[in-house]
Image (tube, rainbow, N blue to C red):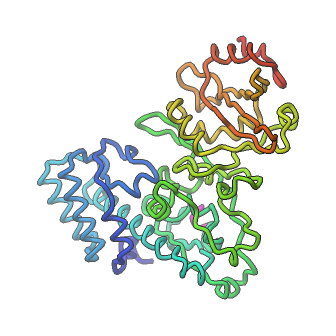
């Protein structure tokens, strides 16, 4: 098994272009630049000087463009540290390797994604296979994904396109229709359900939901974030390669009944909102009270941007909890303006300050064919009581909120 750093073979232009467009961002902690922001920002954890960052960036660029080795970068690292008098965490050899590997692996990932998503490539290779690195000490989940072959436009790749952690050497191999047959498959595999676990940011205390098997901060696709920028859309294939247009991005057709977004799709939508998604489902009693022909509640990009401005205390973990608020509220009420109010007590891991519940407001369109989440925030008990005095409780007990 070759070492991970030996797997960075001859440089190619897409990887170089990805790295060259990054802006330098001074930081004090490795989480200061988070997830998809890495696709447009160059950082070295704890490097707060632009001059220091510039020297590191030049050394990494040299490695990408000229194929310089880890040993050469370690010599550069020692020179740069001495020049700037930089005090850093960790042993020098380990720290240099982290900087070198992480930057090169994400650049190569973004470059491969750019190559694999050209119209010409997708026409010939409409499927992608997850390929494990072959490490003698594999991550169990990465090894379990080995051989998983999905459509190139499957939402799974928005959060699981490698690298999926520190020192991850996994990759994605493009597969043709003939190649799929040679693998003994009559069609692509079914994407596994994405399970998440809570992870607390050691600097801010903020709780994130991280997919199982992926290191915190790696649950994004470097090439997708770079290629699509603010749009951050999944790749799509031609209609001829996508019978019936099924399973396309949930923001694609605002008139069609949307499927409820997976956690990965919701995370991608939150990162760079566009169009709208199916956020979750409401119970039949509430659907009837709102005279709705659908039980799916949509979230539009416009509403999400407005809510983030008005309620900046809502974290990714709070938004990830909203489908549960819609589907399993502790209380629902109908307000005088005809909108529905849904309440769900905050779970222990999300409690902070004096907020006691997630409060969501759902509005039906005049025709009753669509429902939208128009507001969601962390509510204090006084706010909850005020809201309940102005509405009619449909399910749950208002007295439970008097305590």
Q: Residue 228: horizontal and vertical position, in percent? A: 49, 61
Is 109 displayed left or right of 340 in the figure? left
Residue at 17 percent across and 54 percent down: it is 81
Taking the magenta stretch, the answer to whether it contains residue 143 is: yes
x and y, in percent, of residue 92 in the image? 25, 56
Tell me which corner region of the image, top left, top right, bottom left or bottom right, holds residue 152. bottom right
Expressed as whole percent of the image width and height from the top left, the position of residue 138 reads 53, 66
Relative height, residue 378 to residue 79 (above, below):
above
Q: Give the residue at x 63% y 13%.
A: 382
Toward the left, the furthest residue is 83
Task: Please state the extent of the stretch shown in magenta in the rendering.
Answer: 140-144
Quadrant assignment for the C terminus: top right
Residue 184: percent from left, percent from top:
72, 84
Q: Which residue is nearer to you in this view: 79 or 378? A: 378
Query: For residue 232: magenta?
Result: no
Vertical side of 347 occupied by 251: above or below: below
Q: Please identify the dominant SS of the magenta region.
A: helix
Pick the front one: 339 or 36: 339
């Amino acid at each position: 098994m070759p070492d991970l750093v030996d797997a960075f073979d001859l440089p190619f232009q897409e990887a170089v272009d990805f790295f060259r467009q990054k802006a330098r961002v001074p930081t004090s902690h490795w989480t200061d630049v988070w997830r998809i922001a890495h696709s447009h920002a160059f950082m070295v954890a704890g490097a707060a000087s632009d001059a220091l960052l510039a020297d590191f960036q030049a050394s990494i660029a040299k490695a990408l463009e000229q194929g310089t080795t880890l040993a050469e970068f370690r010599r550069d690292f020692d020179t740069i540290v001495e020049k700037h008098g930089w005090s850093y965490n960790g042993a020098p050899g380990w720290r240099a390797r982290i900087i070198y590997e992480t930057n090169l692996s994400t650049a190569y990932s973004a470059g491969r994604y750019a190559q694999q998503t050209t119209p010409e490539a997708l026409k010939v290779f409409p499927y992608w296979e997850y390929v494990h690195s072959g490490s003698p000490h594999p991550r169990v989940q990465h090894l379990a994904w080995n051989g998983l072959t999905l459509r190139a436009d499957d939402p799974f790749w928005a959060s699981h396109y490698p690298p999926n952690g520190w020192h991850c050497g996994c990759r994605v191999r493009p597969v043709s229709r003939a190649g799929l047959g040679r693998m003994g498959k009559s069609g692509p595999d079914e994407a596994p359900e994405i399970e998440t676990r809570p992870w607390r940011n050691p600097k801010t205390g903020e709780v994130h939901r991280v997919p199982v098997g992926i290191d915190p901060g790696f649950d994004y696709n470097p090439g997708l974030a770079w290629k699509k920028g603010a749009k951050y859309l999944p790749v799509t294939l031609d209609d001829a390669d996508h019978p019936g247009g099924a399973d396309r991005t949930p923001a694609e057709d605002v008139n069609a009944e949307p499927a409820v977004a997976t956690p990965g799709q919701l995370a991608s939508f939150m990162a760079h909102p566009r169009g709208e998604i199916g956020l979750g489902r409401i119970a039949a009693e509430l659907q009837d009270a709102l005279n709705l022909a659908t039980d799916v509640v949509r979230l539009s990009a416009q509403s999400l941007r407005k809510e983030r401005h008005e309620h900046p205390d809502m974290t990714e973990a709070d938004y990830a909890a909203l489908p549960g608020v819609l589907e399993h509220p502790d209380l629902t009420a109908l307000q005088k303006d005809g909108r529905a109010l849904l309440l769900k007590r905050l779970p222990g891991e999300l409690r902070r300050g004096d907020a006691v519940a997630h409060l969501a407001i759902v509005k039906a369109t005049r025709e009753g064919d669509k429902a939208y989440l128009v507001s969601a925030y962390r509510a204090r008990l006084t706010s909850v009581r005020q809201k309940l005095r102005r509405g009619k409780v449909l399910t749950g007990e208002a007295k439970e909120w008097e305590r």
